[in-house]
Image: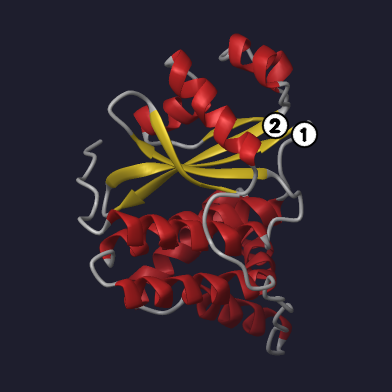
Amino acid sequence: MNRPSLPANIEEFERALAECLTIATRAMPDSPMVSIALPAEQGLRTVACSHARAELLDELQSTAGHGPCLDALDSGEPVTATDLGADSRWRRFAAESGLLSLHSEPLKSEGRLLGVLTLYSGRGGGFSEETRVAVRVTADHIGVVFRTAVDAARMREVAAQLKEALTTRAIIDQALGIVMAQRRCTSHQAFEMLRHASQDRNVKLHQIAATIVEKVTGEPPQRSRFEDPPPREVGWA
């Protein structure tokens, strides 16, 4: 998969990524450690993280030259482990990290690979559906951030759109359940159906979801409450 050149105003782009991560982690009930890493000359370069240890875990893989983040970056496909101790793919990383669950989501823009968003946890069993939806929505919005990286004001608008998407995640969750039941498909397949419908009709994802819920229940869906984090400088955690 092609890897595009990063925008000239890289600092603005990285600040936007950090802002997206700050918003996204508020919508993840599992409270994982989260990082966003971009490709570097050798391995990865972490540009935003919710916890200092997440950066160290990225660096551990980058130094070793292998690991789930690098696999996701090389393949362009999500990489997941729900019991890392029993996973044969990265035995050394599992032993050194002490983790049990992780998920690496490739970040793409118009088919081009930008980097990887990774969740780490010391608890086994993977992550909740609510957290996985937040990851996919965030990954989509980071692709938008990249396309608008030449305009700092537009980046902040995209971050606001991400907040709106996560605020309405309860509606998306309801619609996913309906589509899964009607189509007899997985949650990932249901999400892809909603995302394609959103793109094809040029309508926001949560509006597509709300229409589905209202058609089935006969009532407009209720929006979930989203509280803003206290003001602070966005950057390294």
Find numbered disc 1 in the image and state the secondary structure of the residue it sits on: loop
Number of numbered labels in the structure image: 2
Q: Which mark is residue 125?
A: 1
Q: CA gap, disc 2 to disc 1?
A: 7 Å
Residue drawn at 27 percent across, 27 percent down: 41
- Of 113 and 20, nearer the camera is 20
- Of 158 and 185, nearer the camera is 158
Find numbered disc 2 in the image and state the secondary structure of the residue it sits on: strand
Q: Are marks 2 and 1 in contact (CB under 8 Å)?
A: yes
The answer to whether residue 168 is visible is: no
Q: Position of residue 79 (x, y in %)?
A: 52, 32
Which quadrant does the N terminus fall into?
top left
Residue drawn at 56 percent across, 64 percent down: 233
Q: Which mark is residue 148?
A: none
Residue at the farthest bottom position: 219
Q: Quadrant of residue 167?
A: bottom right
Query: In this figure, which residue is indicated by the disc labeled 2?
Result: 101
* Residue type (three-letter) at the residue carrying disc 2: Ser
- Colour setup of the view: secondary structure
- Horizontal side of residue 224 vs 50, given as left or right: right
Looking at the rendered image, the disc whose residue lies closer to the viewer, 2 or 1, is 2
User: Badge 1 local density, few (<14 within 10 Å), some, or many (20+)?
Assistant: some
Residue drawn at 63 percent across, 40 percent down: 52
